[in-house]
Amino acid sequence: MPLDLVTIPCRTDNYAYLIHDATTGATAVVDVPDAVPILAELTARGWRLDDILITHHHDDHIAGVGAVRAATGARVCGALADAHRLPPLDLALTEGDTVAIGAEVARVIDVPGHTIGHIAYHFPASGLVFTGDSLMAAGCGRLFEGTPEMMWASLSKLAALPADTQVYSGHEYTASNIRFALSLEPDNSALMLQSAEVEARRKAGRPTVPSSLSEELATNPFLRAGLPQIKATLGMTDASDAATFAEIRRRKDRF
Ligand code: ZN
Ligand code: FE
């Protein structure tokens, strides 16, 4: 049975996600920007919470962890590398570790760059990945702590997942990400298509997340840094993929 997934908008532009296995009743939440909307959703659905899956240490992803843990007794899971600055962890995770959510298993992928201890949760059976502020729809997180090389390696790991994987990131930034992407690739037809779709979804008040990995590979300039036409556009024909990624990130920071 596929997992039920509920997207919960929090704060200005954050998303938390409830993942529910109907067979066993097991439920996890990915990131806790705010306790109130998450507890309200659990109550409304009559779901118990078993696990809190943290992507990284920034306040807009963990502010509600303490309150949700106190209210539900859920196990708190997060990156071992950042255990010293995350809420107290019941389960400290690194690359390749697994977390069972009912019958489904999430595999941990280390994706440093935005922060050092940033992890993503991949659910291979359901084809979902929760990426926090690493890979985002048509974009990626800023490099607050890591190097461009680090983030490029992280994005490359995510890019290697099956193409039909649905990518759930931590923010609703897609419209502005697409504006930047179009400034680099004004003739990218997949990007134009995605732009129209995103505009329609936002007008209807719907989230633009998730997107499929195949869509990201066709539109996301940060995943496309290795392509000859992108390097040519930037005048970086002979540059490494990571150096090209670094230049795209620099341009986005100033955009
Ligand atoms: Zn962040
Ligand atoms: Fe964030």
Image: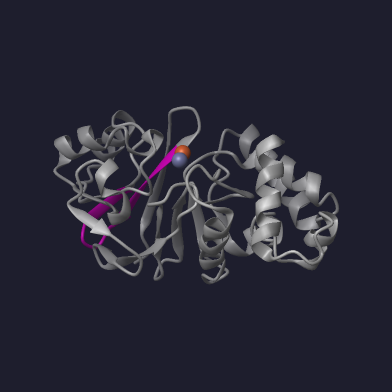
Magenta stretch: helix, strand or loop mostly: strand
200 shown above or below 249:
above
User: Residue 7 at x, y = what percent?
Assistant: 43, 43
Quarter of the rendering occupied by the N terminus: bottom left
Q: Nearer the viewer, residue 167 or 120?
A: 120
Left or right of residue 79: residue 237: right
Number of marks: 0
Q: Nearer the viewer, residue 25 or 252?
A: 252
Specify whether residue 16 is painted magenta. Answer: yes
**Residue in the image at 54% along x and 56% along y:** 151
11 shown above or below 196:
above
Magenta-tinted stretch:
15-29
Specify whether residue 148 is painted magenta. Answer: no
43 shown above or below 134:
above
Is residue 14 visible in the rendered image? The answer is: yes
Quarter of the rendering occupied by the C terminus: top right
User: Residue 25 at x, y = what percent?
Assistant: 22, 56
**Residue in the image at 41% along x and 61% along y:** 110
Q: Nearer the viewer, residue 26 or 70?
A: 70
245 shown above or below 62:
below
Q: In terms of image quadrants, where is residue 9? A: top left
**Residue in the image at 28% along x and 41% along y:** 85
Is residue 200 visible in the rendered image? The answer is: no
**Residue in the image at 65% along x and 38% along y:** 253
